Image (cartoon, grey):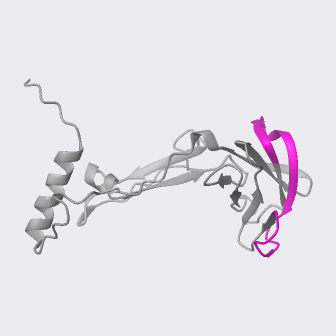
Amino acid sequence: MGHGPRNHFDAVIKSAGGDNAVPGDYLYRSHTAIGIRSGILGVFRVSEAGMDAVTMTAKQTGGTVYGFNTVNPTTGKFADSVDVYSPGTRSGNTCTGTKIATIPLNHGDPMTGPSGSSTNGAWWFAMKAGVTTACAVSNTNGNTGGVGTLDLATILPACTNVMPPAGGAHKPNSQENRVTDMTDMFTKTVPHDTKKQ
């Protein structure tokens, strides 16, 4: 954590997810708005206690869905496989829907088949056109583990122009000009309240 490049401190909390160990995705970011616009942010995931975290992402429907399993924090090992349901939704500690694949993890498959896995917890499957939801649950020795879901209707479009240049193709040649231009870009692109208080 920090306030600037030379002013920082470490924050140590009792457990991942805070005092109540709440699983989920947590955003961390730069304190200043200009940092967020420049992409100085990230997300870290807290899994349920004693379970691996399962994630999925995709660019569009009818394409390849990419998934990833972490190790189980209790055992330090990957699950044996992941069951994929598409369409699918989470139901408690498992998935419901149409089971389309059981993918053995860390198999070292080439990315030429409809599903498979690499050797680092990553895996993939082909989602049918028109299907927008998927659910995956990991398995170790016949026991279910972490559950991950994907809803393509909620995926945000990618940012292609995070920081538009101020005044066209102008390129500042000194640090002062760069700071001034960044401030101008920020004030021109962020709406401000014009009412007097």
Q: Quadrant of residue 40?
A: bottom left
Q: Position of residue 52 (x, y in %)?
A: 71, 55
Q: How many marks?
A: 0
On the question of residue 32 being in view, the answer is no
Describe residue 154's horizontal placement relative to residue 64 as left or right.
left
Q: Nearer the viewer, residue 119 or 93?
A: 119
On the question of residue 27 being in view, the answer is yes
Residue closest to the far right: 142
Q: Is residue 119 above or below residue 123?
A: below
Range shown magenta:
85-114
Q: Nearer the viewer, residue 8 or 120?
A: 120
Q: Position of residue 73 (x, y in %)?
A: 69, 59
Query: Which quarter shows the C terminus?
Result: top left
Q: Is residue 110 magenta?
A: yes
Query: Which quarter shows the N terminus?
Result: bottom left
Describe residue 85's horizontal placement relative to residue 179 as left or right.
right
Q: Quadrant of residue 39?
A: bottom left
Residue at figure coordinates x 44%, y 54% from the top left: 12
Describe residue 161's horizontal placement relative to residue 59 as left or right.
left
Q: Nearer the viewer, residue 95 or 31?
A: 95
